[in-house]
Image (cartoon, rainbow, N blue to C red):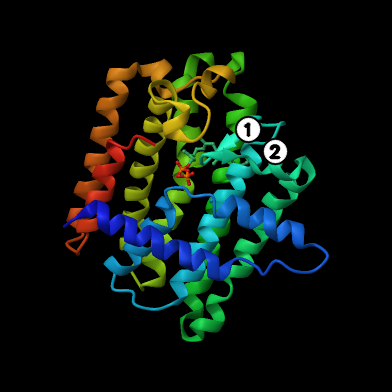
Amino acid sequence: MNFKAEQLEKIAYIETVLGEYLPQKEGLQKIIMEAMEYSVMAGGKRIRPTLMWETYKMYGGTGEEIHCFMAAMEMIHTYSLVHDDLPAMDNDDYRRGRKTTHIVYGEDIGILAGDALLNYAFETAMKAFDIAPQQSLQIGKALQVLAGKSGIYGMIGGQVVDVKVSGTQNHKDNNKEVLDFIFRLKTGALIEASMMIGAILAGATQEEIEEIEQVGANIGMAFQIQDDILDITSTTEVLGKPVHSDEKNEKITYVTLHGLEQSRLDVEKISGEAISLLKKQEKNSEFLECLIEALIYREK
Ligand code: GRG
C-alpha cells in the first residue's frame, strides 16, 4: 500500500465533505459563517474523521450517513482549538499555519465561532436521520457518544482539569495520575468517539464497540505524548503553531515527568498495543494500522 498517497487522497475527500456541510455564508450574521469556514478549512491532519471513516469501513459500513458525523467531529475538534487559542486560555496567535480565528475576527467572534461550530456540529450530525432513516437507532446511539465524549465527562472535563487543577500544589504527589486523566479526556475522548461512532453506524456489536474504544484510548494517549514531545523538539514552521507553549503556560507534561527517551518508547509501546488490539478483530484494518504507525513518527 502506498500509505502516504492514500492518506492524502482521503484528506482531500474529507475536505470536500467538510465544504459540503459547512453553512452558506449569507444573512446579516454572515461573519460567523466566514469565521467557521476560516477555522475549519485551515488545514489540519483530519485524523479524527479519517479514523471514523476507516473504522466504519472496517466494520462493513457503506452508507452516506457517516459523512455527517465525520464533518460534525471535525467541527467539534476545530471549536476546541479555536477556544483553546483564546486569550483566556492559551492565548496563541498561530494555529494550523495561519493566524488564529480571534486574531483575524476579534475575540467576540472567536468565542462565537467556537460556540457556532459546536452547535452546528449537532445540526450536521442530525442530518443523518434524513439520509438514513432506517438507521435511526444507530444514529441516536452515535449522537449519544458524540455528545458524551465532547462534554464534561470527556474533552471539556479534561480541559477543565488542564487549566484549573494540573498546576496546583495539591496535585504534586499524583501528577502522573492527573496527567493521565487529562490525556484520556482532553485528547483521548474525541479519538475514542470517532472510532466508536464509525463502529456504531456500521452496526458493530457492543463488544466490538468497547474494543474499538480501547484502541481509540491508546491512539489518543500516544498522540498526546507525541504532542508533548513535538512541543519541545519541533519548530513553529513545521508545527504551524507556537512551540514551547507548555513551558510558557508552566504545564507539567509527559516529557517533564518521564523524560524524552522514555516518552518516545511509550509512544511506540502504546501504539503497538493499539495495533495488536486491531489485529485481534480479524478485519481488514491495514490502513488503520499504517496510520497508527505513521502517527508514532509524525512530525506535526
Ligand atoms: C476549549 C473545550 C475546550 C477544549 C480544548 C483540544 C483542546 C481542548 C485543546 C487544544 C490543545 C491541545 C494540545 C489539545 C490536545 C489535543 C490535540 C493534540 C489537539 C491537536 O489536534 P491535531 O494535532 O490538530 O489533530 P490538527 O490541527 O491537525 O487538526
| Mark number displayed over residue 129 | none
158 lies left or right of 101: left
| Quarter that holds the C terminus | top left
Q: Decide which of 219, 280 is in the foreground and name it.
A: 219
Q: How busy is the neighbourhood of tag 1: few (under 14 within 10 Å), some, or many (20 plus)?
A: some
Instruction: Name above or below for residue 201 compared with residue 44.
Output: below
What residue appears at the point 38 percent right and 45 percent down from the top-left corner? 217
**Residue where numbered disc 2 is placed:** 103
Q: Is mark 1 within 8 Å of ligand 1?
A: no
Seen at 67% across and 50% down, the residue is 114
Asked if residue 151 shows in the view, the reply is no
Percent x, y for residue 88?
Answer: 72, 31
Q: Nearer the viewer, residue 282 or 58?
A: 58
Q: Where is residue 37 drawn, in percent x and y? A: 62, 57
The image quadrant that residue 225 belongs to is top left
Residue located 57% across and 46% down the image: 153
In the image, residue 227 sits, relative to residue 166, either above or below, namely below
Quadrant of the rendering where the N terminus is positioned: bottom left
Do the residues bearing badges 1 and 2 touch, measured as CB atoms within 8 Å?
yes
Which mark is on residue 93? Answer: 1
